[in-house]
Structure formats: C-alpha cells, structure tokens
Image (cartoon, rainbow, N blue to C red):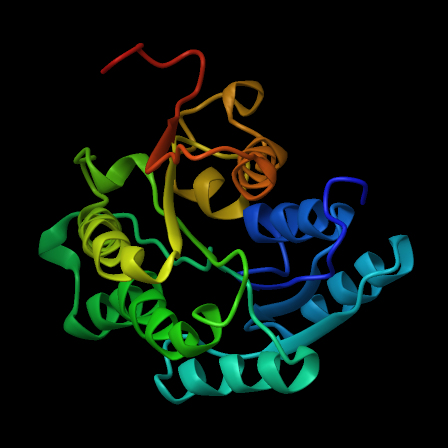
Amino acid sequence: MAETTKRMTALVTGASRGIGLAIARELADIGYNLALVARSEGALKQAAAEIEAAGAVKVKPIAADLSNEESYGRIVKETAAAFGTLDLLVNCAGLAQQGSFTDVEPAEWDRIFAVNAKAPFFICKEALPWLKQSQKPIIINIASVVGFKGYINQSVYSSSKHALTGFTKVLAKEVQPFGIRVHLISPGGVATEMVKKMRPDIKPEELLQPEEIAEIVRFLVTRKGTGTIDQFYLRRYSSLAFD
C-alpha cells in the first residue's frame, strides 16, 4: 500500500475470476477501495471477502448481468453511494464464442456484443461525471489480440473486441480535455477458463497468467511523469514477435 497514500476507488467488471480478479487483488494491494462487478453473486461475494480479509481496503460486490443495459447506471450509482468517489474504471468482463460465422445466431451475436462492447461504452458514459471529479481519473479497457487480428472461428468475439478497441481510441480523445487517461490492454492467450475453451490447441504452460495483466494495470495507475501509454499488446512468448 506504500505506492498509494490516498484511498481511491476502482470499479472493476468481470471481477469474480480470471483477469478481473487478479486486477482487483493488485489494486487492493496498492490501496484502492473496490467495487467488484460480476454476474455470479456467489463467486463475487467470495472474491470480495477474500480481498477484504487480506488488507485494509473496503470492497463492494455488485452482482450484475452486463448484457442487461439497466445494469450500467446501477453499478456506477452503487459504487458512488458506497464510496463517494470513482477514480478508476476497469472494463474487463467479456464473453466469447467458438465456431464458424455461418453458425452464429443473432441472439448470440447480441449477447456477446452487449457484454464486450456495449457495456464498456455505456459504463464509461455513466462513470464520466464521477471521473471528472477525481484527482487521478483513469479508464482501462481490457481488449484482446483479436481486437486487431482475425482468428478463424472467433468471428463474433473478434468483432466485439475490434469495436471495443475502436471505441477506446475515440474515448481517449474525447475525455483528454478533462484530464482522464485512457489505456487499452490487448493480451494474447491468457490462462482463463474462456481461453482454455476457445484455444485448446495452446499448451497450458505457454499461456499468459492473469497476474501478468494485473501487473500492467498496477504499472499504469502508479507510474509518475508527464508521458502516457495509450495501449499495451502482451503476447505469449511462444508466439511470433511483431506479428
């Protein structure tokens, strides 16, 4: 907690497991109070209890289905009500699909886009008034390598992450006048349940670990100086460099 002297608040989606949970743990370690959002209330409460027990920060679990647009404003309001501030927004929740685009039904397309692209868009909109009040406002969107590459049988997932990447580029420009820093992290294959199902061809030992993404988040929110970093692409060491 030495790196952060002022108690700030972070809102993290997809926080009950995988990358989101690793990020939440890392932020708690540097002193952020946390609003954690996930669909599974049981797993979310377990994660919140674990993080609170490990340190002095306060944690607010907020169960929400991000495919439901009514959740966007609610999670921001509950965060603000619990802590009175919002300094950091991490959009990490995500869904994926595996299979040919010819097999995709409109309902599946809508569901994946709702969580991966629509939710970050409108959560950012709802959070903006609170972020404007922060002394160190930051938005971090977790995209994917598929946000600038196209992988066979990942048509909807790839399209949604392309959408998130495009939105993040515009968002960064639009909120720059308010002193809000926006970062995009695009990892390759990470050792999560979703990736294991999507890419069973990748050897488990070659996958990135969620903690590696969390370390980048820590770096972004604690670094000093006048420079900024728009985006990170973190690839598996076994994949081809600069591909």
Residue that appears at 20% across and 35% down: 151
Residue drawn at x 68%, y 65% is 34
Q: From the viewer's side, name the closer residue of 5 and 101.
A: 5
Depth order, front residue of 185/100 = 185
* Residue 43 appears left or right of 126: right
Q: Position of residue 52 (x, y in %)?
A: 84, 62
- Which quadrant of the rendered structure holds the C terminus? top left
Q: Quadrant of residue 214?
A: top right
Coordinates of residue 4 in the picture (x, y in percent): 72, 47
Give the tally of numbered discs.
0
- Quarter-of-image position of residue 218: top right
Left or right: where does residue 183 sit relative to residue 214?
Answer: left
Quadrant in the picture for the N terminus: top right
Left or right: 209, with 114 as reference point: right
Q: In the image, 238: left or right of 43?
A: left
Q: Compared to 165, does 205 lie above or below?
A: above
Q: Residue at x 52, y 39 (%)?
A: 220
Residue 195 image offset from top left, x and y in percent = 44, 41
Instruction: Answer above or below: position of 162 versus 214.
Output: below
In front: 219, or 141?
219
Residue drawn at x 51%, y 19% is 206
Task: Report which quarter residue 164 is drawn in.
Answer: bottom left
